[in-house]
Image (spheres, rainbow, N blue to C red):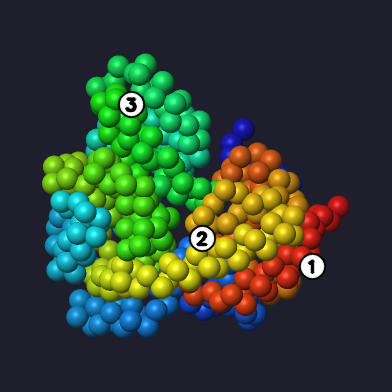
Amino acid sequence: MGFDLAADLAARREQHRYRQPQIMDGPCGRHALVGGQQYLNFCSNDYLGLANDADVIEAFRQGARDWGVGSGASHLVCGHQRPHQDLEEALAEHTGRERALLFSTGYMANLGVMSALLGKRDAVFEDRLNHASLLDGGLLSGARFRRFAHNDANALSRQLQRSDARRKLVVADGIFSMDGDEAPLAAYADACEAHDAWLMVDDAHGLGVLDPQGRGSLFAQGVNPRTQILMGTLGKGLGTGGAFVAGSHDLIETLIQFARTFIYTSAMPAAVAAATRVSLHKSREENWRREKLAELIARFRHGASELGYTLMPSRTPIQPLLIGSDAEAMALSGALQEKGLLITAIRPPTVPEGEARLRVTLSAAHELKDVDALLLALDQVGRRKPDV
């Protein structure tokens, strides 16, 4: 039979699920430049508007002048430079942990943690709507893999009670990237403590956004001391790139020794680490960014609800409009792009069947008039039907 790749690609096109990257001809920010045209950008994860911040850019430039543009090696060879160490210490302090460890991406951090801690005698329990990197990490760890109903602590508790695994690891997103809702972390911590399990939270979308100092979901929900493993990314709220894991001294030492995605990859450029220290400081001290976000979120939710769009229960910058049909979501995204607004249609398998949506994301770089322009366009295009 061979590899009939053309047939697979054709089938994906017919399902309205064919994906292609749009080439951005400008930096991440309030606007996106695509094909010579400027759009209001409502699909980036630059929640605090730090990706194109002047102070962060200058720190990156200075870091490149001082440290070059590449680390040259993995952390355990000769790639761990002073800015990496300084950033790890700053992240540990920010998150109230003994230590933190840098990874090249959030995906690699999640794979690395689970492969280092789990094996065939263990079990991992994951929320059904967890990010793909968490699901892949659990599957690749070799542990017994269990999924529980979304945000259902009772279902989790029942699964934990039935398990006889040596180690039990419960894994959840702090904020779910496609719905924008938050995990009930206190209830998960209760279940873990009752059944001798550890709790790991991927707070990629909470870091910088939640808590008055931007420390994320664990602080916003008061469960930081009850959560053994925190993973955070640097390329969303903090505006740079890479990721980290924070926890106890023994956890970080274990990852250094056994996490293959840490051991066998080059360290991020030191300039990125230097820039991230500045963005971390700004995210902590400049609470006006979170206050502005809250104002933008409230304005959008009120307006979209008034227009009759189906919102999801989110108080975060992730504000999906549930459409349903893949084709209709694509048509609406295209209609908005014609009006100068860039919003991606999210379709299965990223979201469940029948739950295609427009994933609107807001940033402190936006202005109230930008939200008003989006609402006006949504009113004008309505629920655009796909071409037949």
Q: Nearer the viewer, residue 328 or 281?
A: 281
Q: Earlier in the sequence, mark 2 or mark 3?
A: 3
Tag 3's secondary structure? strand
- Spatial separation of the CA atoms under disc 2 and disc 3: 33 Å
Q: Which residue is the site of mark 3?
A: 123
- Rendered position, 236 above or below 50: above
The quadrant in which the N terminus is found is top right
Residue type indicated by callout 3: Ala
For the residue marked with disc 2, what is the amino acid?
A: Pro
User: What is the CA distance from the residue labelled 2 to the residue labelled 1?
Assistant: 23 Å
x and y percentages locating residue 343 in the rendered image: 63, 63
Q: Amino acid at mark 1?
A: Gln
> For mark 2, does the 10 Å Cα neighbourhood hold few (<14), some (14 to 19), or many (20 or more) residues?
many
The structure residue drawn at horizontal position 55% and vertical position 68%, both measured from the top left corner, is 296
Q: Position of residue 224 (x, y in %)?
A: 27, 47
Q: Quadrant of residue 277?
A: bottom left
The residue to which callout 1 is attached is: 380
The answer to whether residue 334 is left or right of residue 222 is right
* Discs 3/1, front: 1
Residue located 35% across and 44% down the image: 201
Residue 18: image location, x then y, percent: 65, 52
- Which tag, 2 or 1, sits closer to the chain's start? 2
Residue at label 2?
317
In the rendered structure, the answer to whether residue 281 lies left or right of residue 290 reads left
